[in-house]
Amino acid sequence: MLDIENLSYHYRKGDHSLNDVSLHLDKGKLAVLLGKNGSGKSTLMKCLLSLNKGYEGEILLDGKNIKEIKNKEAAKLISYLPQDIPHSSLTVYDTLLLGRLPYLSYRNREKKKDDYLDSIIQDLHLENIVNKTSDELSGGERQKVMIAKALVQECKLLVLDEPTSSLDIENQTLLLKLLKRLVTEKNITVLLSIHDINLALRFADEFFLMKDGNMIYKGEAEKITEQQLEETFDTKFRLQTDEYGYKFISIGE
């Protein structure tokens, strides 16, 4: 589904942000990018969206180079949620409707009932704020709205950069459960970066660990080891399993 081959990128001469990164991600998987700040996670995601130009290597989506994919086709294939959430004078509903534009003709872009959009509104519990503008929302509410906007595109690949950063624990879990369900029911692929290792261990199918622009581990989440996490974060971890069979980490000996 997604293949990245020998990807390198630098912001200025001699300062590499990505160093010969390669990965493969199958359809119907939820994959997590983990690493400290500055490890290259956001840079990798921006290359996927062609927001970072001039990279070396190839990025293939369903075997097709993303540089050859036209914008309207790309909008149906890839949806992206950046770290920085912009303010807007649009209502929440109108903001979400923007995510449906790739599926509407120029003659038919007026407001109308959209069952899929309505289902996402219900899944993320946005019913009470659909008529509010961005300026009337809290940071967590704006985050949920932009997540919903990404979801309503019905894309094959969903790329989320720190989607849980402004959410409380309840909504973080709600989001990850929703993503996991969409992966299963819609057979989409999700690539996201988060800081909460335990949340990643609970929901991820695949792990990609990054450090200093390098990919130091890629593989199944259930095979992750303490040593790999310690190398990534320069911190001593203890990897354990709870009574339900889920792995979790604690810091220290």
Image (cartoon, helix red, strand yellow):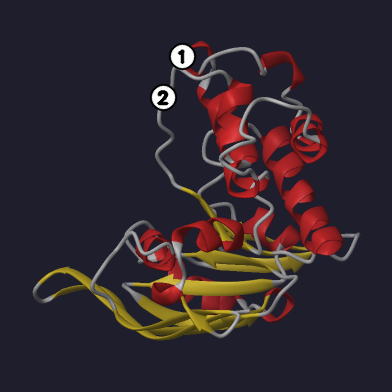
**Secondary structure of the residue carrying numbered label 2:** loop
Q: Quadrant of the N terminus?
A: bottom right
Where residue 167 sits, quadrant-wise, is top right
Location of mark 2 (residue): 87
Quick one: label 2 or label 1, which is nearer the N terminus? Answer: 2
Residue 137 in sight in this render: yes
Residue at (67, 16) in percent of width and height: 129
Q: Nearer the viewer, residue 246 or 21?
A: 21
Q: Position of residue 231 (x, y in %)?
A: 45, 76
Residue 25 rendering spot, x and y as whole percentages: 62, 78
Q: Residues within 10 Å of mark 2 (few under 14, many from 20)?
A: few
Compare residues 20 and 250 and report the one nearer the observer: 20
Q: Quadrant of residue 206?
A: bottom right
Do the numbered discs 2 and 1 sit on residues whose CB atoms are within 8 Å?
yes
Q: As drawn, is 50 to the left or to the right of 140? A: left
Quarter of the image with the C terminus is bottom right
* Secondary structure of residue under mark 1: helix
Residue depicted at x 44% and y 47%: 82
Q: Is residue 148 left or right of residue 124?
A: left
Left or right side of 123 for 39:
left
Q: From the top left corner, tell me how far across and down residue 201 is, in percent.
A: 69, 63
In this rendering, the count of numbered labels is: 2
Residue 135's disc number? 1
Please name whichever residue, 55 or 165, is drawn nearer the observer in this view of the structure: 55
Tell me if residue 20 can be seen: no
Which residue is drawn at the image coordinates 77% and 47% (left, top)? 178
Residue furthest left in the image = 13
Residue at point 70%, 65% (across, down) = 204
Asked if 40 appears above or below 214 in the picture, the reply is: above
Amino acid tagged 2:
His
